Image (cartoon, coloured by chain):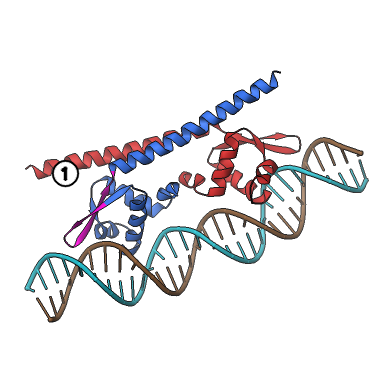
Chain colours: A red, B blue, C cyan, D brown
Amino acid sequence: MRVQALGDPTRMAIFERLERGPLAVGEIARSLPVTRSAVSQHLKVLKHVGLVTSQRAANRQIYRIDVDGVAGLRDYFDQFWQESLQAFKHAAERSAKEQSR
Amino acid sequence: MRVQALGDPTRMAIFERLERGPLAVGEIARSLPVTRSAVSQHLKVLKHVGLVTSQRAANRQIYRIDVDGVAGLRDYFDQFWQESLQAFKHAAERSAKEQSR
DNA sequence: ATTTAAGGTTAGTCCTCACTAACCGTTAGT
DNA sequence: ACTAACGGTTAGTGAGGACTAACCTTAAAT
């Protein structure tokens, strides 16, 4: 589920590292209290939901924020909140009408 | 963590039930394949992050969407995405400047 | 060619979290 | 008072997910 993507603190931390610019897996791991393996697995998840992209540079994999993906997820959430509030508003109006008859 | 609030499918389903109007715990449980206890625990979480409020009506607890809370969470996410995109944009510009000198 | 460093994958462990069952207090009805 | 229904709490269980360690492939360096 898309919501889960940033649910884990470590995954969140990785994402925030990437906000400051593209990084290789090892560079991220060095600044975190987890192994490269863990970082690699988290990046896999982030990539899967479209928040980051990767690109080979010789030996290394450079990860960076996927601007389109972030925007897409933002829109997704936006729509969700929008619909929630609207649905509830409609329900409230319907309820008010029931009261007055 | 606030992100976790809608991470669970059952919790999501409960929230969506409430979009159609206020409901008692038992009413929600009856429309879901889980016990009242589970629903009660989920509502506790939703209440804790400010997505719903509760109100006693005699014997029962009526839960409803907290419009302010939803709006607040919407704003929180909005800001998060905003900052992500902005930070990355700045990083990209900085990087471009490095290249050209 | 060997060595070194990178990163992805897998098996196994541990911990978190969703869930049930059993219990409790509270309220309304008889 | 007794009963029945509601809903919150707790202990215990099971499943999923985060993590490490070990292994593998690939690419650059000597």
By secondary structure, the bulk of the magenta-drawn segment is best described as: strand
Name the residue at 60% across, 26% down: B92
Can residue B91 be seen in the rendering of this structure? yes
Where's residue C9, x and y in %? 67, 51
Where's residue C12, x and y in %? 65, 65
Name the residue at 47% across, 31% down: B82
Q: Is residue B65 magenta?
A: yes
Q: Nearer the viewer, residue B3 or A61?
A: B3
* Quarter assignment of residue A84: top left
* Quarter assignment of residue A93: top left
Number of numbered labels in the structure image: 1
Where's residue A67, x and y in %? 54, 30
Q: Residues within 10 Å of mark 1 (few under 14, many from 20)?
A: few
Please identify the quadrant where the C terminus of chain B is shown.
Answer: top right
- Report helix, strand or loop for mark 1: helix
Q: Is residue A91 magenta?
A: no
Give the residue at mark 1: A95
Letter of the chain that mark 1 sits on in the rendering: A
Q: Amino acid under label 1?
A: Ser
Q: Nearer the viewer, residue C4 or B26?
A: C4
Where's residue A78, x and y in %? 39, 35
Q: Nearer the viewer, residue B37 or B94?
A: B94
Name the residue at 20% across, 60% down: B60
Task: Please determine whether, in this image, residue B22 is positioned above or below residue A77.
Answer: below
Image: magenta residue range? B54-66
* Quarter assignment of residue C13: bottom right
